[in-house]
Image (tube, grey):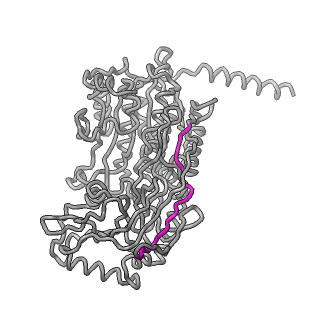
Amino acid sequence: MKIFIYIPILLLFAGCAGTKSITYNTSTDDLLSFSSFIETDFLRKHLEVIAHDSLEGRGTGTQGIEKAASYIADFYEELQFTPKGDDGSWFQHYTLNASITDSLVYTTYRIEGTDTLRVNHSVESIESYGEYYRLFGGSAPIAADIVFAGFGVNDPSRGVLNLDSADISGNWVLLFEDIPHIVDGDTLINPQINSNDRLSLILRESNARGILFISEQIEEEYTILARMQSKIVGTPENLTLEYLDSGQSRSGFPVGFKNVHPELAAEILGLSDPSELESLRDGLIQNITKFRAHKTGFYLDYTPYSRAGAIESKNVLAYLEGTDPDLKDEVVVLLAHYDHMGIGEPDASGDMIYNGADDNGSGTVALMAIANALNEARQSGFKPKRSILFLHVSGEEAGLLGSRYYSDHPVIPIENTIANFNADMIGRSDPEQTEAGDTDYVYLIGGDIISSELDSIVVAANKRSVNMQLNRRYNDLSDPSQIYRRSDHWNFGRFGVPFVFFFTGLHADYHRPSDTVDKIEFDKYSRVVQLIYTSSVKVANSASRPQADNQEFIDITGRIPR
């Protein structure tokens, strides 16, 4: 009996002693060999979860992003990494102030001389829908006449002046959603005039208060979309970090964009049936140079019922401690935002879930894949000299909020953060590169415009691993688009932390429901992730920390308020 008691106890103590005395090999070459564990099957498996419809687009402050946070945390728990959140958890919590709309009320009147007759009263809320539904904006009340503007286009070169009317100013503008550029082979309107040009002209130059689009759907389709759209009433908007909130109004975008039920649109336009809308449209095309915007004799009183609120959000933090006693307090931060746009305006198919597979499911799962490879290395006795923090932030789409919170409340002091690698939209190719047949590239933003040493490490890592084209198209402090400070890495860069933003470009599915897993270029995606892994290991094992040595960048960050 004593043998069976003592032997397990001795083995237990032996095991504990062995665990405490483990000495890891820090060989860079050996660590780099584990990049082979970054495989497309792993990426696909986890991306299909992160970008699944059940996560409802991972909007900050929604149930869907809570599911995503739990999934990410469970993954690191399984790897037995160290949680670095609040109170020993995986989560760093922060509070956001928001405006929350409970309902939108629409009352339509027909004006008859000095009298008005109410013809419609609709309430859009999470429980109801009506003859209008919101597409965008509309945070302020609007009570104004409805002016019909046809296609809402001015193209003086072709004699098209739909908006040549003083009636537009201060009123609602009702118009057909499409722009008929070419009809029967003839150019009717300059093809370079797009929807954004049209809306800018109506709102800024003609001073309209709101836009009403004539719905192209039949009644059944309209009802389905209106019902779906009503479900997102109450979604928090105009988010601001509570600790930075100046107390100024979070009124959002006051101008309203609405879709109108085809039956009501027909009534407003004096038609007896919605089927006549198509013939009206055809007639406008035939006489487009003669048409001018005019009042319809109808009036719309729109009132949003909103309130100030607060929501809780969270970053997910996982930590792999380094092994070098002199360097392990220094950290390389691997960064990706895991939020997306949530549920929003439906596309042509009626899909309202913005899955965000590329933006930024691709960066989220990239960090998980790198962690998995480093775990395989650890289990084989290899770890880097410096520590690595896996930082998954929320609130990026609302204004880099999660990364701002972390950088102001770091769990590892900023002065001990030696580099930041940000992965955001790394799963696709932009149309220009695709058309040129050159998709084996990644855009590098940061690097040499901040730190020549960090740039040299990434270049060497690329040669050592995937040997992709390192495209520096956006890597310019004078770039008008200022991409170098338009993603989460900037909240490290503003403190002088050298960073590289890995990015593969925008595409037609950007911020659309069509950003789905089936569009991801997995072979390319896996290569980009391998490059980030190799760069991370090289920085973590470098003899010295990379310095911010571009004086122009130092001067810029010194001028921009923190």
Is residue 440 visible in the rendered image? The answer is yes
**In the displayed structure, does residue 25 sit left or right of residue 444?**
right
User: Which residue is drawn at the image coordinates 66% and 20% (left, top)?
Assistant: 17
- Residue in front for this viewpoint, 185 or 255: 255
Pinpoint residue 384: horizontal percent, then vertical percent: 46, 25
Determine the image quadrant of residue 202. Answer: bottom left
Pinpoint residue 294: horizontal percent, then vertical percent: 29, 71
- Highlighted range, magenta: 95-112
Farthest residue toward the front?
Answer: 114
Tell me: residue 326, above or below residue 377. above
- Residue in front for this viewpoint, 21 or 297: 297
Quarter holding the C terminus is top left
**In the displayed structure, does residue 222 sit left or right of residue 84?**
left
Tell me: residue 476, above or below residue 338. above
**In the displayed structure, does residue 64 sit left or right of residue 478?**
right
Quarter holding the N terminus is top right
Pinpoint residue 340: horizontal percent, then vertical percent: 46, 49
- Residue in front for this viewpoint, 496 or 472: 496
Is residue 385 visible in the rendered image? The answer is no
User: Which residue is drawn at the image coordinates 80% and 24% (left, top)?
Assistant: 6
Farthest residue toward the right?
Answer: 1
Does the magenta segment cover residue 96? yes
The mark total stands at 0
Tell me: residue 294, above or below residue 142. below
User: Which residue is drawn at the image coordinates 57% and 61% (left, top)?
Assistant: 126
Tell me: residue 290, above or below residue 9. below
The majority secondary structure of the magenta stretch comes to strand
Pinpoint residue 299: horizontal percent, then vertical percent: 42, 68
Does the magenta segment cover residue 494? no
